[in-house]
Amino acid sequence: MSRQQRITFSAPTQDKAPLFVRMTTQSETQQKKIMDALGIQLDPIGKKKQ
């Protein structure tokens, strides 16, 4: 079983302000089964863009 990771990508916008996009890698089947049994959401934070 591998791991699930949270990734943050950042890039400057046209006006030089930072743009951050955060997302979670997809869970493997075994991870999904464990998280379902524990009542944990697969992606509790969801995608975020700031």
Image: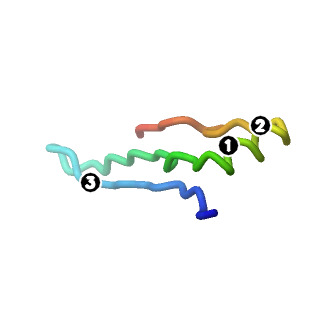
From the image, tell me which residue sits under label 1.
Answer: 32
Judge left or right: residue 21 versus residue 40. Answer: left
Judge left or right: residue 2 versus residue 21. Answer: right
The 10 Å Cα crowd at callout 3, few under 14, some 14 to 19, many 20 or more, is: few
Residue 15 left/right relative to 35: left
The label on residue 2 is: none
Look at the numbered discs 1 and 3 and tell me whether their residues touch, using CB distance below 8 Å: no
Which label's residue is closer to the chain start, 1 or 3? Answer: 3
Secondary structure of the residue carrying numbered label 3:
strand
Q: Could you say which disc has been placed on residue 11 in the image? A: 3
Residue 26 image position (x, y, % from top left): 51, 46
Depth check, front residue: 49 or 28: 28
Report the amino acid beneath label 2.
Answer: Asp
Q: In this view, does 5 lie above or below 29?
A: below
Which is nearer the eye, 24 or 19?
A: 24
Q: What element carries label 1?
A: helix
Amino acid type at image mark 1:
Lys
Name the residue beneath numbered marker 2. 36
User: Marks 1 and 2, Cα distance to the nearest angstrom?
Assistant: 6 Å
Q: Which residue is drawn at 23% across and 52% down?
A: 12
What percent of the width, then of the height, locates residue 30? 68, 50
> In the image, what residue occupies the spot 58% across and 56% down?
4
Q: Is residue 15 left or right of residue 1?
A: left
Whole-number angstrom distance, CA of label 1 to CA of label 3: 31 Å
Element at label 2: helix
* Contact? badges 1 and 2 (CB < 8 Å): yes
